[in-house]
Image: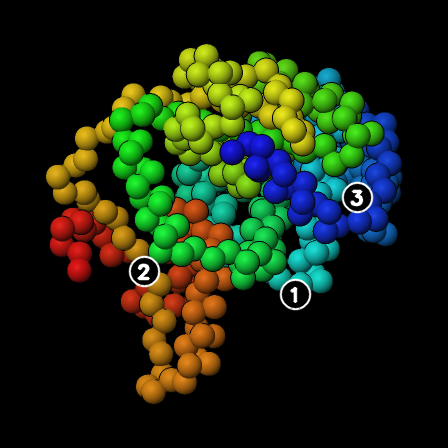
Amino acid sequence: MYSSHLKFVFGLRLIFAGCVAVVLCFLPNGDVRAQETLRIAAVVNEEIISAFDLRSRLKLVVTMSRLPRTDETFQSLAPATLRTLIDEKLKFQEAKKLGVSVSQGELDGAISVVEQRNGLSPGTLIDALEESSVNPESLFDQLRSEILWSRIVGTKHRDNVIISDDDIDTAVATEEAARNQPRYHISEIVISVDSPDQLAQVNEQILSLSAQLRAGADFGALARSFSQSPSAIKGGDAGWLRLDQIPSEVRSIVTALQPGQTTQPIRMSAGFALIKLNEIQSGAVAQKPDALLKLSQLHLPLPQDAPQSTVTSYIESARQSTEAAQGCEAFESAAGEIGSPLSGSLGEVLLSKLP
């Protein structure tokens, strides 16, 4: 799974070209905003990333990862953070070419997910960041890039993904045959190596992230900020995997972990990975006799006798507005932006009561 993630990221990164980065010395804490705004940290296809942008993102990363706000911490994370900002700039440029954008409703939904994952009350994240002298715009840019990237990937590859009935039958049969196998709930931080001359730099970055984790940094926050795997938007959560779904090159490493432990940096075929074992399930979990579901809906009232073109347009609008939503609250927020008053929560429903 990790190997395929790395190859997938590597392939998509070849879409972009013309990135030149120049890392500058980092200014110490103090009243340096004017100076940092004028200083250039990187130039990406003629667009500038300033030293102020870099410091703002570092403050966000350090705050969300619960790390000490020291110059040593900032210096150690600066190279990986700048690389992330360069990637984001490339994503924004590609989105502009494709005419892809993020609505306020989608951004609000993503903020809500971050609040949930950090145990914050709804609507309190921005105030908490400002109290910590963190520019919320840096968080907004990070979230926008995540949403845009998922949409860019969907736009470029959706037509190439075809799932047949045989594929579904095979997947169901595989799951049924593996019901009694143990499963591992894992999270990941994956950083790709795009060319051989980047190997030393990326190795230094992954070692720095590993050191920050040992110092008590939050794994999910670092994954969201630095990982190049598709799981980054979920804080690196790769879900529950059987042993046969874990690449053989890391299988023995993962099985040797205890829940809560994280590996040392692992050299993969196209980069490096850090893997955290969250939980282990030994064998099949007994099914509940009647599962209780929490349902939400997006309701779009169609005009009477609407032509197929209108139906297609409505479906595409619903897809674009909800595909980046993570969780019920984010989905309901997106539905409220474009749907009728019938959109929203349907409450809790027993599975047996559904049509």
Location of residue 94 in the rendering, given as x and y in whole percent from the top left corner: 70, 56
**In the displayed structure image, the side of residue 145 where residue 327 appears, left or right:** left
Identify the residue at image location x=45%, y=74%.
312
In the image, which disc is placed on residue 297? 2
Q: Quadrant of residue 11?
A: top right
Residue hosting label 1: 99
**In the displayed structure image, the side of residue 138 where residue 283 appears, left or right:** left
In depth, the one of 235 and 73 nearer the eye is 235
Q: Tell me the crowding category of disc 2: few under 14, some 14 to 19, or many 20 or more residues within 10 angstroms, Cα based.
A: some
As drawn, 310 above or below 270: below
In depth, the one of 170 and 191 nearer the eye is 170
Identify the residue at image location x=78%, y=34%.
195
Task: Check disc 2 and report its element: helix, strand or loop.
Answer: strand
Task: Check disc 1 and report its element: helix, strand or loop.
Answer: loop
Location of residue 187 in the rendering, given as x and y in whole percent from the top left corner: 49, 28
**In the displayed structure image, the side of residue 199 where residue 290 appears, left or right:** left
As drawn, 303 above or below 110: below
Q: Tell me the crowding category of disc 3: few under 14, some 14 to 19, or many 20 or more residues within 10 angstroms, Cα based.
A: many
The quarter of the image holding the C terminus is: bottom left
Residue hosting label 3: 49
Amino acid under disc 3: Ile
